[in-house]
Amino acid sequence: MGSVSDLRKGLIIGFEGSIYEVIDFLHVNPGKGQAFVRTTLKNLETETTIKRTFKKGDNFDVLKLEEKAAQYLYKDDCNYFFMDMESYEQYVIDETKIGSSKNYLREGMEYKVRMAEGKALGITLPNFVTLIVTSTEAGIKGNTTQGGSKPAVLETGVRIKVPLFIEEGDEVVVDTRTGEYSERK
């Protein structure tokens, strides 16, 4: 059990039957009356945010968020399937929880699945992933003085800018934090 004094940014709590992350909090101590804490909570299952006020004596469960190594298997209509690398258990994660991370998912690659209370809440991407260029324009030599770049489509469908020397079929390393080209493999 947690108390109001435990509230801080990033804390994962069980409250009203759902799992929430504390996004923001403000401790208020009015001149008269009881102190309280105003919070903004993000529901990790539905991705919605709520504002909630906690007073002294209000309790909630403090949950531990863990990450498990899992291999990306496949996607169906609206779910992504991952397999735990140790127990071979499969996790199903809704497309809304994956978000823009889907641009960097390659079948067979290993990712970290965020878990709380036995529920898969989302994934953590590695900083860099290697993807294959499926289409790009032919680079024209000599049309720039500083290297230059051109658009390319990767195997996941994401579009990025790559140097002129990159061709279709090349493997490129992409920084998942910025979505930019890093190097050719």
Image (spheres, rainbow, N blue to C red):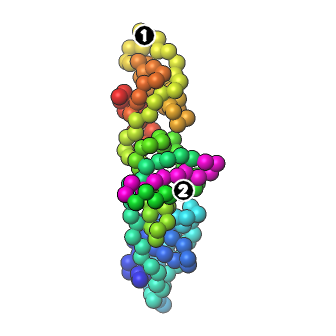
* Element on which disc 1 rests: loop
Distance, label 2 to label 1, CA atoms, is 45 Å
Q: Nearer the viewer, residue 79 or 53?
A: 79
Which residue is label 1 attached to? Answer: 141
Give the structural element (helix, strand or loop) at label 2.
strand
Q: Is residue 173 above or below residue 113?
A: above
Q: Is residue 79 magenta?
A: yes
Is residue 110 inside the magenta stretch?
no
Could you tell me residue 40's position as x and y percent?
A: 51, 69
In front of the other: 65 or 3? 65
What residue would you read off at disc 2? 93
Q: Amino acid at mark 2?
A: Ile
Q: Is residue 51 left or right of residue 146?
A: right
Q: Residue at x 48, y 42 (%)?
A: 107
Tell us which disc is closer to us: 2 or 1. Answer: 2
| Outermost residue toward the front in this view | 88
Identified at 54% across, 56% down, the residue is 93
Residue placed most toward the observer, 7 or 89: 89
Residue type at numbered disc 1: Lys
Q: Are marks 2 and 1 in contact (CB under 8 Å)?
A: no
Residue interval drawn in magenta: 76-86
The answer to whether residue 26 of the structure is visible from this angle is no
Q: Quadrant of residue 112?
A: bottom left
Residue at 57 percent of width and 56 percent of height: 94
Specify few, some or many for label 2: CA neighbours under 10 Å numbering under 14, 14-19, or 20 or more: many
Which of the two labelled residues, at mark 2 and mark 1, occupies the earlier sequence position? 2
Q: Quadrant of residue 50?
A: bottom right
- On screen, residue 88 above or below 52: above
Q: Is residue 37 left or right of residue 127?
A: right
Q: In the displayed structure, would residue 90 be above or below residue 38?
A: above
Let me know if residue 65 appears in the view. Answer: yes
Instruction: Tell me what residue is drawn at x 64 percent, y 48 percent.
Output: 77
